[in-house]
Amino acid sequence: MKPQMQPPSSALLLPTIQSSRATEAEMTIFPHCSELVSEVRLLPLPVVPEPRGNLTFIEGQRHVSFDIARVYYLYDVPSAAARGGHAHKALQQLLIAVSGSFDVTLDNGRLRRTVHLNRPNIGLLISSMIWREIDNFSSGGICLVLASLPYDEADYYRDYDTFLNAIG
Ligand code: TYD
């Protein structure tokens, strides 16, 4: 069966995404910053629906614009815990709520928005130089991350003011 690109349901996503015909522009997290359109966006992922269950797949350079160099996932996260709290100099990532839900707060140095992820067929693309905080994990929530580069501590900004200075 041919994979279908399933548009997001309005019940699941950002207030700015009102309809199942959401355009790519409507799916940007900072829609009023045209120069930032590609920085952070929600990506509908392919779904192969079957009576046996759904299957979603992601290929580097096809569904994400980078080669996938690393996969990691956050799980068993206490509901009161916060992950992230950093930005990356070069790393690009795609975050997916493969189970349950969580919030991702994104900050490009000028705007800050919180996205609630709760669908395994929606990815949140975060380019470099975006501060992110991840919290409000549901019970059983799993955050799957596809990353463009291997782990490198030197790629992190872990201090918010240092990040802001780097943004300029
Ligand atoms: P960190 O990226 O700060 O996690 P989060 O953003 O979820 O809060 O990483 C937490 C720790 O795990 C840190 O000591 C680095 C280590 N780590 C790796 O060794 N490899 C990896 O790929 C990642 C993402 C983290």
Image (cartoon, rainbow, N blue to C red):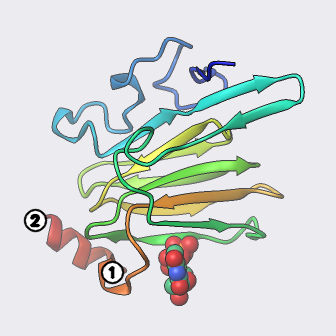
Mark 2 or mark 1: whose residue is earlier in sequence:
1
Task: Note whether 114 is above or below 29 in the view shown.
Answer: below
Check the picture and name the quadrant holding the C terminus: bottom left
Towards the viewer: 94 or 159: 94
Q: How crowded is mark 2: few (under 14 residues within 10 Å), some or many (20 or more)?
A: few
Q: Specify the label residue 159 is tagged with.
A: 1
Task: Locate residue 143: give its quadrant.
Answer: bottom right
Q: What residue is drawn where x is 61% and y is 44%?
A: 117
Q: Does any atom of ligand 1 lie closer than 8 Å to the CB of label 1?
A: no
Q: Measured from the top left, where is residue 92 in percent x and y?
A: 36, 58
Please state the horizontal and vertical placement of residue 127, each as a whole percent of the image.
32, 54
Residue type at tag 2 = Gly
| Residue 120 position within the rendered picture, expressed as x and y whole percent measured from the top left | 67, 41
In the image, residue 131 sits, relative to residue 65, either above or below, namely below
- On the image, numbered disc 2 is attached to which residue? 168
- Determine whether the residue tagged by mark 1 lies in a helix, strand or loop: loop
Q: What element carries label 2?
A: loop
Quarter holding the N terminus is top right
